[in-house]
Image (spheres, rainbow, N blue to C red):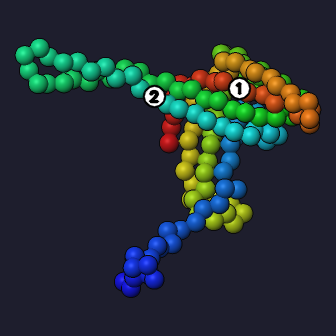
Amino acid sequence: MPLDVFGRLPMQFGGAFAADAAVASFGGLAGGGVGMLAQQLQFSYTQRITRLYEIGSRFVFYVVGRSQGDAAAQRVLGPRPVSLAFYRLYGNPCTSGTLLFQVGVGCFLGEIAGSLSFLLTGVILVSIQISVRAEDMIVGEALQMMYVALIV
């Protein structure tokens, strides 16, 4: 391969993907929660691992505990029926819902052809924080959630 004018190997195009191919769907809400006006979504999934050492040897053992997940969302408070349905579904431990986050792979051409999906199950709302800014009077909401399992 020929070198560029600075004597380096030229970069190669590795492909493309479009940000508009990302979808967050709140299971159990009419229309999948469209109208939630979600601005940011973050989730983590961890497993508890304890290291055990044996006296007199070089062995290390892992004791693997249970997994758990936490999620956070920032949104603008939107249409009242959607917000009330969200609180009723995700705020009640007897009716915890799911959250599906899909990221499209490749350029978005009207459909998500190849995608990477993350399904959060047993999602329950832990806390709600409301804020408002004087300059635009947009009412924002920060949600903290926990969930049972992350399925890819």
Q: Position of residue 44 (x, y in %)?
A: 53, 32
Quarter of the image where one finds residue 1: bottom left
Per the image, label 1 sits on a secondary structure element best described as strand
Q: Is residue 2 left or right of residue 119?
A: left
* Mark sitting on residue 12: none
Residue where numbered disc 2 is placed:
46
Residue shown at 70% from the left, 18% from the top: 127
Q: Position of residue 117 (x, y in %)?
A: 56, 46
Mark 2 to mark 1: distance in Å?
19 Å
Residue shown at 71% from the left, 26% from the top: 143
Residue shown at 41% from the left, 26% from the top: 47
Quarter of the image where one finds residue 20: bottom right
In the image, farthest residue toward the front: 6
Type of amino acid under label 1: Leu
The numbered mark, 2 or 1, whose residue comes first in the sequence reads 2
Type of amino acid under label 2: Thr
Residue where numbered disc 1 is placed:
143
Per the image, label 2 sits on a secondary structure element best described as strand
